[in-house]
């Protein structure tokens, strides 16, 4: 009897899951990938766009063409998931399923911080966690005349953990290029006890020293409470207030609305098993940015494409086994490598094994021109799946 697997989301995790499942399921089983956008980019691309080193169409692929010939791609809005009926409601009609994989990513909710949404709308604040915002921030930075820039991480966790620190370095590089180095102060403010706390204190200390060497300071342990766009002031839970000329913020993140409406979340995220990617609801798996995949009670797998792709392989095998097929057990992994962009067209690497005991084994290789060339080569390989040649 033909089985149907529905994958919600065509980002790196969703595409990887579709490919893995096609290799595990019989040819007549149906695999449907649903996404409202037929255009995808890696997180690092938004930083490149923000810095002005790439244009949107240069760093995008079309899932419809990447997936063509081996799974179905449905360009539609996901309106709801009904686990009891095993049905997904979409703007193109309902889809029944035997298994559904959530790879919808995280949504940004700046409205949960008083004043932040207004600051973003007025251009007093900006961010680079979505394409329109990255383009707007690029324009704002090219008009910036000097002053105090605060790069603030509003809430934990968020996708692309190194990105705020990369953004600060890229902004420093841009203001130096524009002759504003002596008139610009850049500070990163994070609620973490050290930068990239998930990587451990040694990496945090190394990263702090590197940022300082490039003219970027760091303040830790500060939780953003509110933003006053009129007076360009932020307030933290400690009671500290800071003035700014430009606020660059990591907006609060949470799981996609349809996951919350379906009762699949605990808090802001969809809990999923490290070993299988199963959620707490039968027939539903979750991977990537919307999932809370815990290595231990105090440690969640970071939200980055490299981990979403590994989770896709785990979920694909477990889905196939749940459907009754004789396939190997999932191979449990949480090994990741992320490029770390800095100014002067340089890039470093943050890599490690988050399953290592008694704590993750993570290293930070500082940025070099050679690292940037390797990053570009890896990005080119990803884009070679289906490069866009026209405008965005």
Image (cartoon, grey):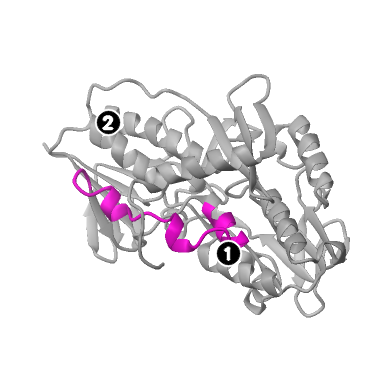
Q: Judging from the image, what secondary structure is the residue with disc 1 in?
A: helix
Closest to the observer: 266 or 177? 177
Closest to the observer: 3 or 166? 166
Q: Position of residue 73 (x, y in %)?
A: 25, 53
| Quarter the C terminus occupies | bottom left
Judge whether 174 appears above or below 125 on screen. above
Residue drawn at x 47%, y 33% as measured from the top left:
273
Residue drawn at x 65%, y 45% as measured from the top left:
346
User: Which numbered tag is attached to residue 320?
Assistant: 2
Does any portion of residue 179 appear in the rendered image? Answer: yes
Q: Is residue 72 left or right of residue 250?
A: left
**Which quadrant of the structure image shows residue 187?**
bottom right
Residues shaded magenta = 45-71
Q: Position of residue 312 (x, y in %)?
A: 39, 37
Residue drawn at x 68%, y 29% as measured from the top left:
363
Judge whether 389 appears above or below 123 on screen. above
Q: Is residue 300 left or right of residue 7?
A: right
Judge whether 164 appears above or below 139 on screen. above
Closest to the observer: 151 or 302? 151
For marks 1 and 2, give the one nearer the viewer: 1
User: Which numbered tag is attached to residue 134?
Assistant: 1
Q: Position of residue 379 (x, y in %)?
A: 47, 45
Spatial CA span between label 1 and label 2:
39 Å
Give neighbour class at mark 1: few <14, some 14-19, many 20+ (Cα, 10 Å).
many
**Which quadrant of the structure image shows residue 233?**
bottom right
Closest to the observer: 85 or 118? 118
């Amino acid at each position: 009897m033909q089985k149907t697997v529905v994958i919600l989301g065509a980002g790196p995790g969703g595409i990887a899951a579709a490919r893995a499942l096609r290799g595990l399921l019989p040819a007549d089983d149906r695999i449907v990938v649903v996404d409202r956008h037929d255009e995808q980019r890696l997180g690092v691309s938004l930083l490149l766009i923000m810095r002005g080193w790439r244009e949107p169409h240069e760093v995008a692929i079309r899932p419809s063409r990447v997936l063509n010939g081996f799974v179905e791609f449905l360009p539609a809005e996901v309106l709801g998931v009904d686990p009891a009926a095993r049905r997904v409601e979409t703007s193109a009609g309902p889809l029944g399923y035997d298994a559904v994989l959530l790879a919808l990513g995280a949504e940004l909710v700046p409205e949960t911080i008083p004043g932040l949404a207004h600051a973003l709308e007025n251009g007093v604040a900006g961010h680079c966690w979505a394409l329109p915002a990255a383009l707007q921030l690029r324009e704002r930075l090219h008009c910036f005349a000097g002053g105090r820039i605060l790069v603030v991480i509003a809430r934990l966790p968020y996708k692309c953990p190194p990105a705020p620190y990369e953004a600060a370095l890229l902004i420093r590089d841009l203001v130096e290029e524009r002759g504003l180095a002596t008139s610009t102060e850049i500070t990163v403010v994070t609620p973490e006890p050290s930068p990239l706390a998930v990587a451990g204190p040694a990496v945090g200390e190394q990263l702090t020293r590197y940022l300082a060497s490039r003219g970027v300071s760091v303040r830790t342990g500060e939780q953003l409470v509110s933003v006053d766009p009129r007076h360009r002031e932020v307030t933290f839970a400690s009671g500290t207030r800071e003035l700014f000329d430009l606020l660059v913020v990591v907006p609060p993140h949470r799981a996609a609305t349809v996951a919350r409406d379906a009762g699949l979340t605990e808090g802001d995220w969809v809990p999923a098993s490290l070993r299988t990617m199963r959620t707490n609801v039968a027939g539903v798996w979750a991977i990537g940015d919307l999932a809370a995949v815990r290595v231990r009670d105090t440690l969640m797998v970071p939200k980055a494409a490299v981990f979403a792709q590994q989770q896709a392989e785990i979920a694909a095998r477990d889905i196939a086994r749940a459907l009754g097929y004789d396939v190997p057990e999932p191979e449990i992994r949480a090994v990741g490598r992320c490029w770390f962009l800095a100014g002067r067209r340089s890039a470093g690497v943050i890599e490690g094994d988050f399953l290592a005991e008694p704590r993750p084994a993570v290293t930070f290789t500082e940025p070099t021109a050679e690292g940037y060339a390797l990053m570009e080569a890896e990005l080119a390989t990803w884009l070679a799946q289906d490069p866009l040649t026209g405008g965005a």
